[in-house]
Structures are given as C-alpha cells and as structure tokens.
Amino acid sequence: MEAVLSLAPGLPAASQPAWSLLDDPAEWPGFGRALEPGDAAARWESQVAVEGMHCAACAFTVEAALMQVPGVVSAEVNAASRRARVVWSPAKVKPSRWFEACAAAGYRLVPAGDMLASARRARESRLALWRWLVAGFCMMQVMMYAYPAYIARPGDMSPDAAQLLRWASWVLTLPVVLFCCTPFFRSAWRDLRQRRIGMDLPVALGMAITFIVSTAATFDPEGPLGHELYFDSLTMFVFFLLTGRWLESRLRDRTAGALDALMNRLPDSVLRRRADGEFERVAVRRLAVGDMLRVLPGEAFPADGRVVAGDTSADEALITGESRPVARPCGARVLAGSHNVGAVVEVRVEALGPDTRYAQIVALMENASLQKPRLARLADRAARPFLLAVLAAAAGAAAWWWQVDPGKALMVAVAVLIVTCPCALSLATPAAMLASAGTLARGGLLVRNLQALESLAAVDTVVFDKTGTLTRDTPRLDRVYSRQGMRPGDAVELAAALAAQSLHPASRALVQAWNDQHRGPPGWVPVQLAEHAGEGLEGTLSRRGGGAGRRLRLGSAAFCGVAPLAVQAAQVHLSDDQGWVASFVLAEDLREDAAATVSALEAQGQAVWLLSGDSGAAAREVAQRAGIALVLGDCTPEDKLARLKDLQAQGRAVAMVGDGLNDGPVLAHAHASFAFGRAVPLARANADFVVLGDSLDVIPGAIAQARRTLRVVRQNLWWAAGYNAVCVPLAIVGWLPPWLAGLGMAASSLAVVLNAARLAGRPLRAGTA
C-alpha cells in the first residue's frame, strides 16, 4: 500500500494503476469496514483524507466527482476536517475507480490511517511556509521601490529612475506570482477545467488582473494603463492571504486536527515472538490472534490482549476516560490504543482491527468528523450562489467604473472579487463543531452526532436511568432467598447460566457473583434464550453433558409472575414452571460524583428526572441519595418513552442519559442522548454521545461546552455576514484598495478559526455557559 500512498499529486494517467493495489480486499479493512459483516456482497464504508481541499466549494466538487462513479452509494465530505466517508458496492466498483475519479477532479484521496500522511502534511506545511517567506521578502522590497513614487514631487525623480524602479518591482513580483500564487492559480484552473466555480477563482482572477495591468503599465508607461501600477498592492495582498491561510491551517490542525491526533494512536510496528522464541519487529497489520508481543515502555498496545509476563501501568485516557495511569499486572487485559507507561510486558493478542474497543471508538469519531450540522449545511448551500453573486458584482462594478476610468474599474473589480470570497462563511460552523468534538473526546466523551451539539445547547431537562448510570456499572449480589429444597448456591448457578447471555448490569452482577466463588462456568447451558427489553430473560437450560431441559425466567417480579420482596433495593427474581425459585437482592453503589453532577445540572437551570425499571421504593432511595426530586419507578421501556414524549409535549428539550442496553427507544427519541457504561457495544449505541469513563460530571460539562459552541458559531456567522455587508459596498464605490481587501479577507477567515480555537483550548468541566 505504500506504493499507492507515495504517489505525487498530478501524476499522469499512466502512473495511476498503482491505485489498483487498493482493489485487494485484504486492504479494505485498513481504511473502512463492511456495513453487513459476513455478507460477500455487502456495501463498504471507507474513510479517506482529501488533499488539496480547503473550502466548502472543494467539498461540493469532491462529493460530485465521487457520486458520478457507478457503484458509489453515498459520499460525505467535510471541508474543515478534510475527510470523506464513501459508501460503495464492491460488486459494482473497486476503490481504484473512485480514487481515480477524484484525482481527475483535481483532488487526491489518501486512505485514512495512512502511515505517510503526517509526513506529507509536514512537507505541505514547509512548502506553505516557504511561500509565505518568499512573499514577505519580495513584498518588503517592492514596497521599498514603490515608496519613492508615493513621496516624490514633480521633478524629484527622472523618468529613467522611475522606470528602473518599475522594472525592479516587476522582477521582484515574478517569484510571488510564479511560486507563491501557484496554489491559487492551480485551484482556479482546475475549477475552470471542471466547469465549476470555486472559492479560489475570484482570488486568482484578482491576482491575474492586477499583475497584467501592472505589467502593461511597466512595459508601456505612456499607454492607457501607464499609471495603474499595483505591484506593491499585489505582493502585499498575497503576503496577507498566505499569512491567513498558513495560520488558519495551523489552527485547524489544533482544532479539527485534534480528532486526528486522538485517532492515530496505534504503532506502525511491534515486536512479535517467532517460533524460535526470539522477537522480531513486524508491521501491525501482520498480527494474528494468539500472537505473543513484547511491548516496550512508551509504546502503544497494538491490539486488545492479556498480559502474560510482567507488570505495568497503562494510559487509557482515550479508551476509558481515566486520566491517570491504570495498573495492569500479569493476567490483566490491555486495550489497543492505550500506552504502556510502566515496564516491558509480554502480551497475548485476543482481538485485532475492527474487533477492538479502540476501533469502535475511532469509527464513532470518524463518522462524527464527517457530519455536517444544520448550520453548516445552510452555510454550504449559501456559499455557491454567493460565489456567482461575487462574480456578477465584480463585473457590474467594473462596468460602472469603466466609463470613468478603465484602470480604476479593473482595480475595483479586483477588490470586489477578493473581499467577498466566502471562506469565513464556510468555516464558521464546522471549525467550531470539530474543535468542541476534539475537546469532548479528550475529556472522555465521544460525539457520535455533531448535529446533537446544537440540540444539547437548548436542553432544559435531563433524564437519568438508574442502574449502570447513576449507580456503578455492575451492582453486587447482597442477599439470596430461595424456595425450600433449593440451595442458594444452586439458585445463583441457574441465574448465572441465564445471565451470562445478557449485558444488563443485573445480569453481570449475578455472573460476577458466580465467578467470585467458582473457577469454572455454571454446570447449565442455555438451549433456547430470549431477552425481553426492560423485563428479563426467558430460556431453557440443560445440564452440561446431557439431561432434561429446564424452562426458567429471570427478571422483574412482574415478568416472573412472583411477588416482589419488601425491601428498598434492586431485586431480580427467578421462576420456573412451578413458580418462584429464588430472589436476589442487589446492592447498588451510587457513583461518587452523582450528587455533585445533579447539583451542577440544577445550577445550569436543568430539571432532573430519574426513570427506572426497578421498584418505586428502590428508585426513590437512589434518587434521594443523588438529590433528585423527580423520580418514577417500575417503568418499562415503553413507560420511559411515554414519559419522555410527555415532557417534550410540554415544550421541554430533553437529554436522556442511559446505559444503552434497554434504553434504545428513549435514547433515540430524546433531543440529545448519552450512552453511559463501558459495557455498551459502542458500534450499536443509539446515543448521540458515548461516555467512556466512570465520571458523570461530563454531562453538565458537555452541556456547558455545547452552549459555548453554539455561541461561537453564531459569533462566527455574524462576523462573516457583517464583514461582507460592510466591505462589499466599500469595494464597489472604490474606497477599498485590493491590498486592504486581501487583508480583510485573510483576517476574516483567520478570525473565524481563532474564535473556534478557543473551544479547543478550554477544558471540559461542569459549569454554566
């Protein structure tokens, strides 16, 4: 694959068959996933980086080029993150085909996760810096040669001296036009060849017109354009524009690029044990389940596995949200993407690639980085018609001024073309949203849906589930009551055999209770099993090695058809065809920060509810400890959904916080939703946000961050609109010279990105917006 990734931009068609390496199905998991695993004809979702793109018009072009390829089902491109999500059918098209189609449109695709991507970005950054330095040096020299003409009085300077200064300015402007302006001319020419209008077209036209007019004045000083000399304005404009773009790129790497920094954490290679017992360094993609690895201090774990030799600590901040290193002694499990910060350890690989928790987190972050919030879509739709209006306004201004002064008319047209470029408008929303998504991810909260940041900012009611959300992920078994003739240990064994097939916290508590007392699995195995969301499990168990089956139910008292216990605690019941078998009382430990989180939410003006499927007494007891006054117990998933709809019918904007297991309908229907708990299958969560660690205080912190984000987005949009409203009339009446227009355009885009960068620098914490 390195051969593909080392292709230089602009390669001729004869060189492009190297993309055929990506047609090997073995390469596809490296930058995508099958939407329906196990189906040979399944559609694939691929994540790619787009090079040469910097605005909304570029994103439109890439999307259009991809969608014209037969077999490409959908394409989403985000101009701020410069990434694309492509859904395609392997039966109709191969990746090389849509890679080539995008290259023909002037943009090169790079598989996400490419090892050479960071080196390529560094080269591009160095080249941009060189262009900026050359433009700055030439601008200072041209300004020095132009200065005498501004201050000289008639007769102070001979015609030969004045012409010499003009020639010197022309020579010094040539490197600016031929080297520094190359990206703008290349982009504009690409747009013209594709018969489209991009944001670089007005800028390139302005540069070309200014240089041509000034060159005509240099070669023919007595001609009609002999007094129109603007080399100083041109070089100053290019310098300001390159300054803005370079700073914008650096700031974008700090904001939108925060997601990339979090996603690119796997090592390129790792030490693997050979058959002779020695270790050799191999590429991570050559690993297989069961391989023995040696991970050195400071290296990232390349796969999920178990420590088989040595004791260490791991930095799992991205994976679990835990900011401090976690002890990982011999026998402990380690996660891909976490860092070994202790000692050398040997690890046996248990899961690779898309099966790791890290891969699920990366998939969520990649999808979030490609989404376009409502405000961003509105801005993108406005950008293209606005470009047409820009060209029309420039032509109209030139026509109006032509009868007065042709030279003045051309410069007015240049100023209008430059000042109205809608780069700031297209960056206003995505820059802020991605900056916040990166900040939230660093704080242990993944954003699955960028649109939800807008909804979360308006939330005034927060609804909590109880078990696994306000309380710890896994409760503990406190007491066991069983019918006559049934030993408590046998009852736990039956319950654990059923519960092992479920991820519900109560089920995990029963399994944990069995594992704490026994080395092996229960002596019963499920033959038939069905889980009823919010109620319990029903199935048939048979003895290992054969024997008659036994029909059982495990769950709530109503589901099992038994009387509840007269205790104010969570309880699970077991019944068979003869009736009640056993009851299990679970002790639930409230999370340490639950009460503080509720207080922080109420300080923000939120109404806080607790909806629980447990008994009303157990729900009220937990709510009292957490400081929640509004509580409702004995809720089925349907009851929770009905209550949520009632709140929404009252005009409330509701955020739901659940464990993602039996709260799917409620999470999906809420204005904004949080899936809480490490055991949640991330790829199947219905929530807009996924909490990685154990801290509840990320909820009020996220609400405060969402409010700040929406405020910054509105500021950016108002700034972009106000800037154009003020500067366009000034340019049309001739009061805004081209160099000042260039400074204003660069400053406008830079101001938008700088404003968004404030969101990336702020820590995630609870508080009022």
Image: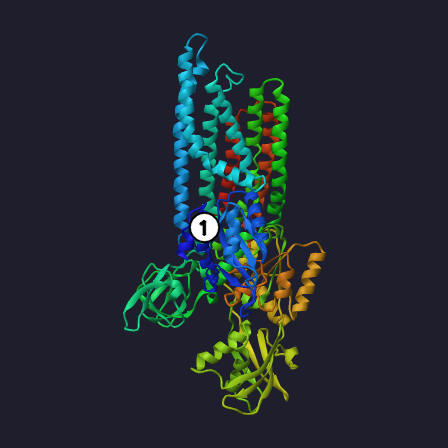
Identify whether 565 is placed above or below 61: below
Image check: 193 left or right of 176?
Answer: right
Which residue appears at 56% of the width and 24% of the height?
A: 410
Q: Which residue is mark 1?
A: 14
> Residue pushed farthest front?
14
Asked whether residue 52 appears in the rendered view, the answer is: yes
Which residue appears at 71% of the width and 60% of the height?
A: 646
Of residues 377 and 646, the one drawn nearer to the viewer in this rendering: 377
Q: How is the image coloured?
A: rainbow
Where, by quadrant of the figure, is residue 538 drawn? bottom right
Q: How many marks?
A: 1
Which residue appears at 54% of the width and 72% of the height?
A: 503
Question: Quick one: quadrant of the N terminus?
Answer: bottom left
Q: Label 1: state its secondary structure.
A: helix
- The amino acid beneath tag 1 is Ala
Crowding at dot 1, Cα within 10 Å, few <14 / some 14-19 / many 20+, comes out as: few
Residue 675: give x, y in percent of width and height.
Answer: 56, 62
Asked whether residue 301 appears in the rendered view, the answer is: no
